[in-house]
Amino acid sequence: MLKTIAQSLAFGLIGLIGLPILTGILALSLGYLFDPRCGTPGDSGGCEMGAATSAVAMALPGFAIGVGIALFRAWRRSRSGDPR
């Protein structure tokens, strides 16, 4: 039980950090790819703020996804009878 809690926290922290990074990179990539105004002086950082906002908004869902993956792995491991 303690191992499952520790793995849930570890996977949750990985999701808490990893998913916002990936979201920010994806948002910036798509913004610069499809919007020719991104990065120009008249933009005033709108594309960058949109990427930052989407990255911050994905922090808690990233944690929940990480915990969910860890719990699913523990459930699957208990069903197969694997003692790890």
Image (cartoon, rainbow, N blue to C red):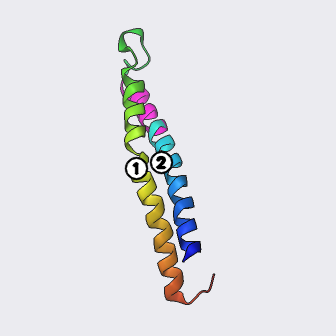
| Residue type marked 1 | Leu
Residue 31 position in % (x across, y down)? 39, 29
Location of residue 59 with respect to 64 vertically, above or below: above
On residue 60, the disc is 1
Give the residue at x 36% y 21%. 46
**Of labels 2 and 1, the one closer to you:** 1
Residue 75 position in % (x across, y down)? 47, 79
Location of residue 72 with respect to 82 vertically, above or below: above
Residue 58 position in % (x across, y down)? 40, 45
Location of residue 37 with respect to 13 vertically, above or below: above
Residue 37 position in % (x across, y down)? 37, 17
| Residue type marked 2 | Leu
Classify mark 1: helix, strand or loop: helix
- Whole-number angstrom distance, CA of label 2 to CA of label 1: 9 Å
Tell me which numbered mark, 2 or 1, is placed earlier along the sequence.
2
Residue closest to the far top: 41
Residue 68 falls in image quadrant: bottom left
Q: Quadrant of the N terminus?
A: bottom right
Crowd around label 1: few <14 · some 14–19 · many ≥20 (10 Å): some
Q: Is residue 6 left or right of residue 25?
A: right
Give the residue at x 41% y 39%. 56
Where does the magenta region start and end? 25-35
Q: Is residue 23 magenta?
A: no
Residue closest to the far front: 2
Residue tagged 2:
19
Give the residue at x 46% y 73%. 72
Q: Are marks 2 and 1 in contact (CB under 8 Å)?
A: no
Classify mark 2: helix, strand or loop: helix
Give the number of marks: 2
Residue closest to the far bottom: 81
Main SS, magenta region, reads: helix
Give the residue at x 36% y 29%. 50
